Image: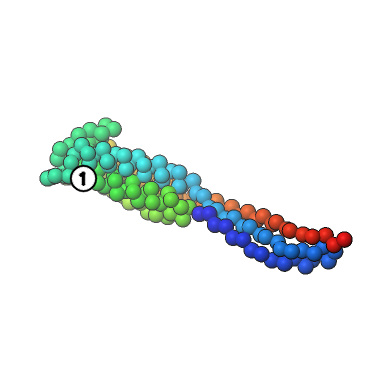
Amino acid sequence: MHSQHTTAVTDNTVEAVETRDVHVTETESRFSPAQLVHAAIGVFLVVLGIISLVRGGLEGDLTDPTFKLIGITHNAAIGLGELALGALLLLSAASAYGRFLGLVVGLAMVALGAVIVADDGLAQDLATDKALGWLAIGLGGAAVLFGLIPARHVRRRTVDRATVVDQ
């Protein structure tokens, strides 16, 4: 977030100098390391999702056909999930205030990954393998970890005085 404020004030603290205007420019910005991590994970998931949708197609059963992508069994249904989670992470990376959204998405990824790893039936229903669960746990854990780091807040103030010396 970047905002800029300009304030015109009169400075009467020095009597020997006539002060016209004092222009104060305040710049405020916030940045969180989570923005970079959430953006990187988001781009990765969006790319995987798009490739999965192109390969799997949206006609008929979304879990058929299956194919290997980065060594993990994928299909169009998984691609839709990756695309949605990636888009949410990219949205969270747009601002330092979005780190909470990235944290929530990361928690959801960890929970979903844990269910896929623990429940063989769900992995079979999704027509994938447990490696997808481990990928979700790893990426979601990174999103959560970096989402917990507070944003850095920087505030700058510049004072410009236009003065006329009485002679």
Q: Considering depth in this image, is 91 or 161 the residue closer to the camera?
A: 161
Residue pictured at 71% horizontal, 63% vertical: 21
Percent across and percent down for residue 91 are: 38, 51
Q: Quadrant of the C terminus?
A: bottom right
Query: Count the marks: how many?
Result: 1
- Looking at this view, is 151 or 160 the one in front? 160
Farthest right residue in view:
167
- Position of residue 57 in the picture relative to residue 138 (left or right): left
Q: Position of residue 97 (x, y in %)?
A: 46, 55
Figure quadrant of residue 6: bottom right
The image shows residue 77 at horizontal and vertical percentages of 21, 45
* Residue found at the far left of this picture: 60
> Residue at the spot x=14%, y=40% of the render?
64
Q: Residues within 10 Å of mark 1 (few under 14, many from 20)?
A: many
- The residue labelled by disc 1 is 77
How was the colour assigned to the protein in this rendering?
Answer: rainbow
**What residue is drawn where x is 51% and y is 50%?**
31
Where is 6 relative to 91, above or below? below
Q: Residue at x 50, y 49 (%)?
A: 32
Q: Secondary structure at mark 1?
A: helix
Which percent across, then down, holds residue 83? 29, 46
The amino acid pointed to by label 1 is Ala
The answer to whether residue 101 is visible is yes
Q: Is residue 128 visible?
A: no
Q: Nearer the viewer, residue 21 or 5?
A: 21
> On screen, 5 above or below 143?
below
